[in-house]
Image (tube, rainbow, N blue to C red):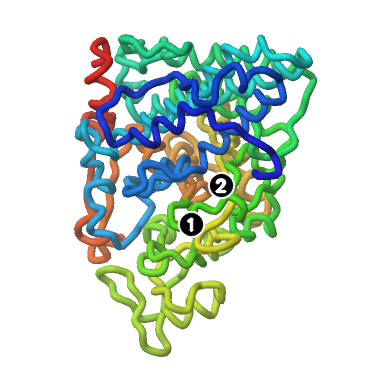
Amino acid sequence: MKNLKYNLLVFALVLITASCKKEYLDTAPTNATGSKTVFETTQNAAYAVNGIAKLMSSQYLQSQGFNGEGTIKMWYGNYPGNHFVVDLSGWAPIINSEFNESVNSAYLYYPWYYYYMLIGNANAIILNVDGATGPEADKQWIKAQALTYRAYAYTMLAQLYCNRWADSNNGAAAGLVLRKDLSTGDLARSTMLETYNSIYDDLNKALALYASSGKTRTASYQMNSNVAYAIYARAALNRQDYPTAETNAVKARTGFPLMTVAEYNAGFSNPNQEWIWSTYGASDENIQFYSYFAYIAYNSSAGAVRSTPKCISRELYNSIPATDIRRNLFLDPTGYTYNTSTGRAAAADGTLRNRAFAVRPLIRSDATPYAYMQFKISANDLPGVGHMNNFRSSEMYFIEAEAKYFQNKPATDVQNLLIALTKTSGRDPSYTSTQTGPALLAEIKKYRAIELWGEGFDWFDAKRWGDNISRKTYADGGNFITALAKTFTPAENNKWTWKLPLKETDFNKLAF
C-alpha cells in the first residue's frame, strides 16, 4: 500500500498506545495530525480513507497478537466454530467461547476497540470531507467509502455484541452505541432495530454517492458500490430481512464471476475475479508473525503453523464428494499412520508426514503435518504475507440461496444457485441438487461450510442459524482433542453474545 499514500488519523494511534489502560474508548481523532490538515484537500482526505484500509491490517495490543481484520476471522469466526480444528489445548478458553462475558478481558474488548477505531476514523471523514478543496465528485466518492466502512464495522459489531435476530424480540433487544459524530460523552445503546436501520441508512447514502460521483476504484482493497451491496446483503441476512438480502446479494456479485479451478487452487492470497473486497497484504506491509497468514497459511514459517497447522473437521471433510476439487485442499490421512488422539503425523518414514510433503512441497521442512490439515490458504511471502479476502461472490450465492429458501421460493431456484456455484464453476462437475424442505437448507449449510472454510464464517453462521456447536474426538467420529470436543447450545454463553467491555461501560454511564 506504500504506492498509495495514506493518513492514519491519530485517533488510531491513541488507541494503540492506550489500549491496555483504563482511558475511555474515544471515538474522535486527536489534533496531532489535525483535521484541518487531513481534510484541507480531497487528495488528503483520500489518503485518510486509505488509512482506514491500513488499520484493517495493522498490529494491535502487541502482547496479544491482534492483527486487524485477520484476528476477527481467526479467533472469533474460525476458532470457536464447528469445522476448524487445531491442536491447541492452551487456547481452550477462546475456542470454547469462555471470554464473551469476561468484561475486562482483552479478548472481549478487542473487537469493540478495533471496529470503533474504524468507525471513529470514518466519522471524521464523513463530517469533514465536504469542506475540503477539490472536485465534488471526489468528495462524494470519499464520503461513500467512509460510510461503507462505518456500515461494515457496525455490521460486524452487531454479530458479536448483539443477540441473534431470532432472540431480539423483533429488534427491541439492546443494540450498539451508535456514534456518528466526534463526541465522546455518555450515549445509550440503541436497539437492534435502530442499529440495523442505521447500517441500511449508511449504505443507502453510500450507494447514492457512488452513483453520483461517477468514479470507480483502482484496487481490490478499496470500497465501491459492490462492497456496499455485499455488506447490505450480509447485514440483511443477519437481520432475517430476506428480500433485502436476496436483492443485494445479486447486485454485489454483478461483475465478479466465480473463480476458475486454477484460481481456486492458487492459495487464496491474491485477489482474483471473484473477490469483491479484500484487505491489502503485500510484502511492503509485512506485520510478521502477527498476520492472519502467519496463523493459517500451510507454508508459513511461523511457529503457529509449523507446530499446529490448521485443519478441517473430519466430519465436514468426509462429506466432500471425491469428485469435488475442494477435497484436495486438505490432507487425506486414509491409509497412513498418525496419532488418532491429536491428528499429529508420526516422524517415521512411510507415514502421513511423507504424504504431506509429497503433495505440498512448500510445507516447511521443520513443520509437523496433521491429518486433515488445510492446503487451501498459502502465504505469498514469509512468515505470513498475503492479501485477505473479505467478500467474494460465493458468499453472495449462499446468501441468495438462504434468502430464497426462507422466503419459501421454489426449491428449483435454490437448487439452481447451488448447481451454478458448485457444478458450473467446475468445483464439482458431478454435483447435482434435488433436495427440498429441511434437506435443502442442510445442503446450503453444508456447502457454505465447505466453500467458506477458514475464511471466518463458522461461528458467525452457527450463531445466526441458532445451531449447536458440536465437536467430537477421534473416538467419537471427529478429530478434535478432548479439551475442545465440546457441545454448546444456542442458549448457553449468554446466547453467544459478547458483553460490552468495561473500557466502554466504566466511562459511558448510559451504556449497559
Q: Residue at x 56, y 47 (%)?
A: 388
Residue 473 percent across, percent down from the top left: 25, 61
Task: Determine crowd level at label 2: few under 14, some 14-19, many 20+ residues with C-alpha closer than 10 A.
Answer: many
Q: Is residue 119 above or below residue 285?
A: above
Question: Dot 1 corresponds to which residue?
Answer: 288
Amino acid marked by disc 1? Gln
Type of the residue with mark 2: Met
Say if 363 sits above or below 51 in the image.
Answer: below
Quadrant where the C terminus sits is top left
Q: Residues within 10 Å of mark 1 (few under 14, many from 20)?
A: some
Lateral position of residue 398 relative to residue 135, left or right: left
The residue wearing badge 2 is 388
Q: Is residue 447 visible?
A: yes
Q: Nearer the viewer, residue 167 or 138?
A: 138
Q: Nearer the viewer, residue 425 or 274?
A: 274
Counting residues from the start of the chain, the first of labels 1 and 2 encountered is: 1
Element marked by disc 2? strand
- In this picture, residue 233 sits left or right of residue 253: left
| Residue in view at x 64 percent, y 60 percent | 266
User: Mark 1–mark 2 contact, CB under 8 Å?
Assistant: no
Instruction: Nearest to the eye among marks 1 and 2: give it.
Output: 1
Q: Residue furthest front?
A: 32
Asked whether 127 or 38 is in front, the reply is 38
The answer to whether residue 370 is above or below residue 385 is below
Q: Quadrant of residue 27?
A: top left
41 left or right, relative to 294: right
Question: Residue 3 sits in which quadrant?
Answer: top right
Q: Is residue 407 visible?
A: no
* Residue at image point 51% right, 72% down: 363
